[in-house]
Amino acid sequence: MSHHQDRIIFFDTTLRDGEQSPGATLNVEEKLTIARQLAKLGVDVIEAGFPYASPGDFEAVHKIAATVGTETGPIICGLARATFQDIEACAKAVKAAAKPRIHTFIATSDIHLEYKLRKNRNEVIAIAEEMVSYAKTFVDDVEFSPEDAGRSEPKFLYEVLEKAIAAGAKTINIPDTVGYLTPSEFGDLIRGIKENVRNIDSAIISVHGHNDLGLAVANFLEAVKNGARQLECTINGIGERAGNAALEELVMALHVRRQYFNPFFGRPADSEEPLTNIDTKQIYKTSRLVSNLTGMLVQPNKAIVGANAFAHESGIHQDGVLKHKLTYEIMDAQLIGLTDNQIVLGKHSGRHAFQTRLKELGYELLDTELNNAFLKFKTFADKKKEITDWDLESIVNDEIQQPPEMFRLELVQVSCGDRARPTATVTLRTPAGEELTDAAIGTGPVDAVYRAINRVVNVPNELIEFSVQSVTAGIDALGEVTIRLRHNGQVYSGRAANTDIIVASAHAYVNALNRLYVALNAPKTTPAATAS
């Protein structure tokens, strides 16, 4: 097996660690949609989930392994604690992939040993050896992580890693589980492993890090300089707490500054050979997809994929960019697949033109999805003279990301004004097929709509987030509404787009309520412990 010391392996954990972001829960079909796009993006490894955690996670990993894990596709990886049952579940889930991987972990820091595992160092070494060997009986490709490596005693860490490699681990992942390290410390940690683990040349060094201090990307780049060759990251940097290292930032840092990084790979500084397998033109589309499906909006000033990343407000900057792009731009927006907001279709465009343009944008829709999306397109085209690529993406995402339809919104009508009490009337079709109508007064039109919907649905919930984003500029722009509801500590998101914000708000709310309703009526499962 080649150890890829001449390039970076991108290990995407959006579907595992990214999904541990509060409120970012995805269903099986949504995970599959993201996995297909990650394959187009060119990631080397997809960590598809934690199979033992729940039947839903198992099913998602299994489906992704069977459909995305092709011979020419990425490695499909599942996470497993260092226990027999976790590893067995993981092995079954990834079995259908052409290139399956089991990623097993156990904590190695004294604080975790004492308070979480209640085991001594010798017991942890024995477990790591035994479980890597056990995983190896199912797959050839085993990855091992010493959880909380950043706070582990170095000599003990070296010993655990040496034994894990001897037992068959081909990748050794070093997690900064709590996002505590600084770049120079992370670099020193990787260099120490390179110099002190005797069989380290038999494995790839990987890194996993959280962004609690905003240092995850900087830490990873320092790790690369010291010999790390696999980077575990997520799209838009989503993940537990402050998130993970952002894939798009790492890819573009290695691309834009490759003259600086080339020598660390044994290449001439001026080599134009890419340092990654990532298709950068897929970055923006992947970012939008993950944002839409998880309901986690990208902040406007986010590096690489934020709405303002290539916008220039300052007059002196605009003048400079108009004269020569390189005055204030270190990369071209087209490099990440951000095309000009071109007008592509109007109300006279036919179904074939609509379908053709969607294929060009990378969308393959089922017949029912295509029909519904086309009907929405025609409705919006009547209200909006020109439909852009961004509008199309919003319409399509709105269609393919719907939760199972339990309650269906049939009518929403609002009355409001500065001298009026905001009042809303809604009609919903229930799961039993019954049409119910109710009305409510609220502090504003959206509040009134939500109160009226709640009266019909009658499922207790707490609205914890409501956000509106314009898809394009202009008074007739589509508005995307994302909301989050909380029920018994669980968060459910809903999203919808419409030229009418009130209508979009109502649909987004019903979407979230449908997810909540499905969850309340699903078989109960016991979640497993979370990981690095």
Image (spheres, rainbow, N blue to C red):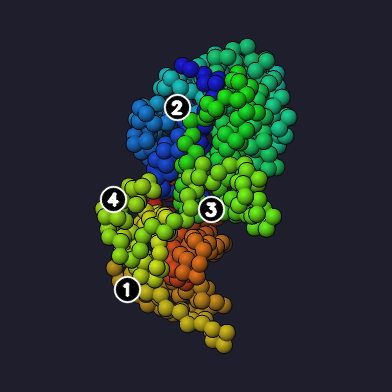
Q: Nearer the viewer, mark 3 or mark 2?
A: 3
Going from the N terminus, do you reach mark 4 or mark 2 first?
Answer: 2
**Secondary element at image label 3:** loop
Across and down, in percent, residue 523 comes to 39, 50
Q: Name the residue under label 1.
A: 435
Q: Distance between the residues labelled 1 and 2?
A: 49 Å
Q: Pointer 4: residues within 10 angstroms few (<14), some, or many (20+)?
A: few
Q: Is residue 237 above or below residue 486?
A: above
- Say which residue appears at 59% left-offset and 33% top-offset: 254
Q: How far apart are marks 3 and 4 (CA)?
A: 26 Å
Across and down, in percent, residue 484 comes to 52, 59
Instruction: Report the front residue among 31 and 110.
Output: 31
Q: Mark 2 points at which residue?
A: 101
Q: Name the residue under label 4.
A: 366
**Secondary element at image label 2:** strand
Name the image quarter holding residue 51. top left
Whether pointer 3 and pointer 1 mark residues with C-beta atoms closer than 8 Å, the reply is no
Residue 296: assigned label: 3
- Say which residue appears at 55% left-offset and 21% top-offset: 6
Across and down, in percent, residue 13 comes to 51, 37
- Say which residue appears at 57% left-offset and 24% top-offset: 271
- Say which residue appears at 53% left-offset and 26% top-offset: 273
| Amino acid type for the residue under numbered disc 3 | Met
